[in-house]
Image: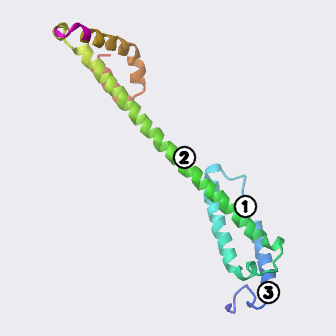
Amino acid sequence: MNPPDSPLPPPDDFAGALAAMRREWAELRAHEPLSDPELPEEDRYEAAVRRMAGFRAFLHRHHAVFTAPDLTEQDREPLEATRLLQLFLDASEKVQRGEEKALQLSADLADGCRDLVLELLNKLAWLESMPQEEWDAMPPETRVKLFDLLEALRPSRESMLGTLPIELRREWERRLGE
């Protein structure tokens, strides 16, 4: 039963309920378009969520009309609009989750690259600070491998330092005597 001040007609008045639904739908469409090209991209999802809440409330208020068997295709337009908006929201949510995952993976990759660079810089610092007596005490094949590693790391020192955050870079430049 509808309260006396309800904008909806009594439940047994289908024609009145249909007319009320059509009026409200026209008002809703005039004030809440499905999309607003003027909105910045980052605000469109939040606007769509608000619209969806309004459409759901509309569908709830007019449930009796939408479940009537003799409803025309034109009168089912709000159902289709709501379905399409829900598809958009679902797709947009998947995109957001994908973007968040990509950002996390990028951060993980950056952390891994930084750790690798720090390990290489540690090796470079260790090799450059090794006293000649230690070099001389090594077996020849070990000395050759370590010298080759030192020669491979030296040319890329600047590019490795360039990948570090500025504070860490300065610390390593001091350690490497630059």
Drawn side of residue 126 relative to residue 60, left or right: left
The picture quadrant where one finds residue 10 is bottom right
The percent coordinates of residue 38 (x first, y second) are 71, 52
Q: Name the amino acid, label 1.
A: Leu
- Between tags 2 and 1, which lies in front? 2
The percent coordinates of residue 85 (x first, y second) are 68, 61
Mark closer to the chain start, 1 or 3: 3
Mark closer to the chain start, 2 or 3: 3
Badge 1 crowding class, 10 Å Cα cut-off, few under 14, some 14 to 19, many 20 or more, is some
**Disc 1 and disc 3 in contact, CB within 8 angstroms:** no
Residue at 40 percent of width and 22 percent of height: 160
Magenta segment's dominant SS is helix
Q: Name the amino acid, label 3.
A: Phe
Is 170 in front, or is 3? 3
The percent coordinates of residue 151 (x first, y second) are 35, 11
Which residue was labeled with disc 2?
99
Which residue was labeled with disc 3?
14
The picture quadrant where one finds residue 49 is bottom right
Against 105, residue 17 (above or below) is: below
Which residue was labeled with disc 1?
34
Q: Is mark 2 on a helix, strand or loop?
A: helix
Q: Is mark 3 on a helix, strand or loop?
A: helix
| Residue 92 numbered mark, or none | none
Residue at 39 percent of width and 29 percent of height: 166
Against 28, residue 107 (above or below) is: above
Range drawn in magenta:
137-141
